[in-house]
Amino acid sequence: MLRSLSASAAGRALLAVGLLLGLARCDWSTTPVEEEALVVEAFLETGRPLPPILLRRTRPLQSGPDSLAARASGAQVTVELDGALYPYEEAPNTPGRYRPATEAVVPPGVPWRLTVRWEGDTARARGETPAPIDIGEVCVDVPDAPARAVQVDSLRRDSLDIPADLGYIYPMDVTVQWAGEQSAPQADANTWVRTQLRPDASSFPSEVVEFFLQPAEVRREEAYPRRDGAHQWQGVYAVPVDSAGAPLPSHNVTTALVRGDTAFASFAQTRTDPDRREPISNVEGGLGIATAVSVDSLVRLVEPGMARCQPAPELSGS
């Protein structure tokens, strides 16, 4: 679900599904293997139609970068939702991409199961679809003036020469609130939430690469503090400017929430771990990730003089 406070085309173009695809951009095929293994990528989203499912196969490094050869074609794919079976079929002219043969919307709070049969092997994953997650309010604190900060050129880092200079940034504190899951007494203890800020850096008059301070976090949902009965999280991003007197550039910032299970949390927490060849997988008989999530995001125009907080009922679009 995407909700926007900006009428600009750029704001409307920031889709919540981008967060999911960003999580799945790991190159599973680079792991040195002696035998081929099936790699699954599937994100079922509560309240949305059944998604396409991507299947690939690992290949030895010496086999070359042929992406077509890495796609797993000719598989039998089924998704079971609350006891109902939905077969998938391979998309024409797109090997390795499978789509549901019949339309169905993913309901909340039901068991699901994915089964993939390919070249004599079977890969499986299972779980329960989470309750919808809905942003209740997003508050943005804009400093009166920029702060002085050290800016490091992340494109030229080495042990002897780390180019850095003093610059100016607006440190932007963003607080998001959402209601906890209500389907079961211990639901918050069994679910995880990934929070993320995605400012539109194309509006910033600077070439600074690293401008995030605390842009994302993954926690068990019950670990997020509560206020007035709702969970809340505070993230920070920085907007670079050229001088101490420069005004805050107008820009969009997307606040995104993803609710999922332990498999989703493990994948999200390990996908950027430099000590791992690939993220933790929950697929039995294969690699990759197959999980159910619920997503909500809000795009807000940040500019001088704006209201600090914006409650959800006043948001435009859904």
Image (cartoon, grey):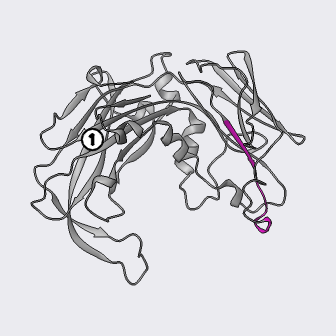
Q: Residue 49's quadrant in the figure?
A: top right
Image position of 303 (left or right of 213): left
Q: Which residues are magenta?
A: 53-63
Circle 1 SS class: strand
Give the x, y percent position of residue 240: 24, 59
Q: Residue 11's quadrant in the figure?
A: top left
Disc 1: which residue: 174
- Quarter placement of the C terminus: top left
Residue type at mark 1: give it: Val
Decide: is 245 above or below 231.
below
Residue visible at 57% across and 36% down in the picture = 262
- Between residues 207 and 42, which one lies in front from this camera angle? 207
Q: Residue furthest bottom?
A: 160
Give the x, y percent position of residue 188: 46, 26
Q: Does the stretch in magenta take in 55?
A: yes
Q: Residues within 10 Å of mark 1 (few under 14, many from 20)?
A: many
Residue visible at 40% across and 23% down in the picture = 180
Residue visible at 64% across and 54% down in the picture = 278
- Quarter placement of the N terminus: top left
